[in-house]
Image (cartoon, rainbow, N blue to C red):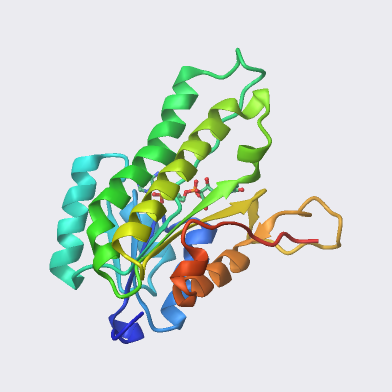
Amino acid sequence: MGQRTQSQRTVLVAGATSATGIAIARALADQGFRVLAVGSDQQRLDERLNFVTARYQADLGDETQVEHLAQRIHADYGPIDALFHLVGGWRGGKGITGQSTEDYEYLHRSVMMTLRHTTKAFYQDLVDSPAGRLAIISSQAVATPMPSNANYGSVKASAEFWVQAVARAFSKQAPNAAAAIWVVKALTDQLPEHPGGPLSGYTHVESVAAAALALITADPATVNGRRQTLPGLE
Ligand SMILES: NC(=O)c1ccc[n+]([C@@H]2O[C@H](COP(=O)([O-])OP(=O)(O)OC[C@H]3O[C@@H](n4cnc5c(N)ncnc54)[C@H](OP(=O)(O)O)[C@@H]3O)[C@@H](O)[C@H]2O)c1
């Protein structure tokens, strides 16, 4: 990342208390990055991420709270260099008529609005950084629409569109920045007992952490706007 040393580079993990968030935060902290973790619950943040530089409680679905979060982070540590957005959620239903509006609104807020709010609040940081980075984790479901996951796949497809729009903005405004989409079937922090078992095709959270480290050091021209399928377990 340009002239900044690694300890001066600030990475924000949004939705950090899941196994995936912890793995990414640990990998980046181990490499000397200044890692800031955000979640909706202070106690979970403190219990699970005591090794990061700072932990911030915020409801990322609330735009005002995200704006205040950005102000606090800027006052405490200055601009960020990378945003890993991990807030997800899952709702399914039986057939098209079983796709409830309540579930759709939950997914829209959890997946999409949290992404909109964080990318808007930190966009200028990523543009101004010597190597701004944004990543989300999407789902294979986007490419294989099913009636049972119509709500979920629609929202994840929206999130991908948003990130591609950010990537397009980066390509015009910030040649050193990159926005990427990682695709998985499912995530796990378990190791399979044998190949071909129930975890076959799942992506281990350590593979996501490795992708985060690779994205940070990659040539932005080769990764900006890339939709990359992460390796799954055998
Ligand atoms: N898990 C899978 O199998 C799978 C499959 C395909 C794609 N993905 C995608 O991969 C990404 C990571 O998955 P995941 O299962 O680790 O994510 P997740 O558990 O759904 O979300 C990550 C964390 O976000 C926090 N969070 C939820 N709502 C929040 C809010 N309003 N404000 C702030 N924080 C909030 C939660 O922690 P707190 O409650 O402690 O705040 C949660 O642990 C997601 O984008 C997901 O859609 C996951």
Counting from the top left corner in percent of width and height, residue 202 is at: 70, 54
Residue sitting nearer the eye, 52 or 112: 112
Q: Taking 157 as reference, is 39 left or right? A: left
Residue at point 47%, 74% (across, down): 219
Horizontal arrangement in the rendering, residue 34 relative to residue 128 (left or right)? right
**Is 13 situated left or right of 139 in this image?**
left
Q: Which is nearer the eye, 56 or 213? A: 213
Is residue 190 positioned above or below 10 on the image?
A: above
x 31%, y 69%: residue: 81
Determine which quarter of the picture holds residue 211: bottom right
Picture coordinates of residue 72 (x, y %)?
16, 60
Note whether 187 is above or below 154 in the view shown: below
Looking at the figure, which quarter contains the C terminus? bottom right
Q: Can you see residue 59?
A: no
Q: Quadrant of residue 54?
A: bottom left
Q: Observer-nearest residue: 170 or 214?
A: 170
Most extreme residue toward the top is 97
- Residue under the point 68% across and 36% down: 144
In the rendered structure, the answer to whether residue 90 lies left or right of residue 101 reads right
Task: State the image quarter where residue 83 is shown.
Answer: bottom left
In the figure, 185 relative to 103: above or below? below
Is residue 56 visible in this depiction of the protein?
A: yes
Q: Position of residue 175 (x, y in %)?
A: 35, 67
Q: In the rendering, at what x and y percent does residue 209 appear?
A: 54, 69
The N terminus lies in quadrant: bottom left
